[in-house]
Image (spheres, rainbow, N blue to C red):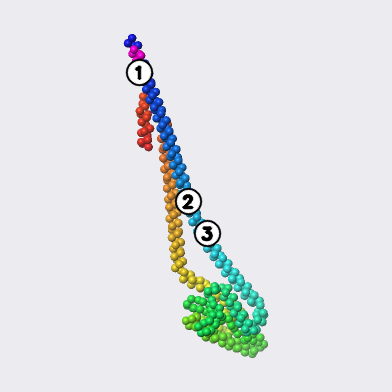
Amino acid sequence: MDQGLILLVAVAAIGLAVVVLLVVLAGLKGRLSMLAESQAAAQAQLAERLQAQERALTRGVEDRLGDLSRRVGESLEKSSLQAHNSMSELKERLVAIDVAQKNITELSSQVVGLQQILDNKQARGGFGETQLQNLVADVLPPSAYSLQATLSNGMRADCVIRLPKPPGDIVVDSKFPLESYRALCDAKDDLARKEAAKRFGADIMAHVRAISEKYILPGETADSALMFLPSEAVYAELHAHFHDIVEKAHRVRVYTVSPTTLWAMLHTIRAVMKDVRMREQAGVIQREVEKLMDDVGRLSDRAANLQRHFDQAVDDVRQIRTSTEKIAAKGERIREVEIEDGAPEAALAAPAIRRAEG
């Protein structure tokens, strides 16, 4: 009887222990399920944050790259515009040179017609003034010269080239003695040629003295003036056979010019005037260059900042990847936990210890 009772008690105790064990296992299973669900939710939140950070980083990089591309494009467009303007100006100069050459060629090929036109003294003066006006207008800007300008002594000059002092305004006279030159060309013998040459030289010197007295005014004009000869033939004859006349004219600071030499002189004057304007604007140019250098410095600083942002973004992504790998490894370890019989508390404590270490 006692042995049966003991056996019954033992069976009851074993059943109770089994029930308790089942209850514990059920509770442990529920906690593991909750832990797994919590881990899954945490991983989902982490993934969302990583995606949000990636999108924000991508937008930031795209914005900065877009701003940098826009600035570089503006700089290239500005350089292209400057190059285009320079080419346009060069083309205009070449066109002006071509026009002047055509004018000179046509003038040389129409010597006979020119002589007929110049037979009339009044027409000759008008022709010289017109040719002078065309040459000056083709080379110089309107602000650089005046036509039929009246000086302080009441004399009217055919053209006044406006230059800064020194040298000051230069007067150009377009009249020339053609009758004596025609007589020189038509001379039949040496005696007639000698008389015509003497008259030609006297007429030239008389005109040179008139120009020196009328158009060289101290304090108002330059200390020299120009006598424009609209015929290359007259200019060539004067410099080939009348050196003494040319030297006397130089001593009173009156210089003879032909269409070709005047064209070259006007281009030289234009270059001088441009250089003067550039010198006047040197301060403005220097300030603009300084601003340009400041812009270049800011562009360099922003490029360096962008590089640092790139480097920081790469480092952040690397750290995020490291954290993700650690979290994934811990999740795998939690998933692989095996609960041994008789050690439920140790099995439950292991994940908490690992979380604390992580």
Mark 2 = which residue?
63
Depth order, front residue of 315/25: 25
Tell me which residue sits at (66%, 77%) in the image. Answer: 110
Q: Main secondary structure of the magenta part?
A: helix
| Residue segment shown in magenta | 5-9
Return the disc, 3 or 1, that comes first in the chain's sequence. 1
Task: Report helix, strand or loop for mark 3.
Answer: helix
Q: If the image is split into quadrants, where does the C terminus sit?
A: top left
Q: Amino acid at mark 3?
A: Glu
Residue 116, percent across and down? 66, 82
Residue 325 quadrant: top left
Tell me which residue sits at (36%, 36%) in the image. Answer: 356
From the viewer's perspective, tell me whether residue 172 is left or right of residue 10.
Answer: right
Residue 272, percent across and down? 51, 73
Mark 1 = which residue?
13
Tell me which residue sits at (65%, 80%) in the image. Answer: 114
Depth order, front residue of 187/147: 147
> Dot 1 surroundings within 10 Å: few (below 14), some, or many (20 or more)?
few
Depth order, front residue of 47/293: 47
Mark 3 = which residue?
77
Asked if the stretch drawn in magenta spans residue 6, the answer is yes
User: In front: mark 2 or mark 3?
Assistant: 2
Asked if the stretch drawn in magenta spans residue 43, the answer is no
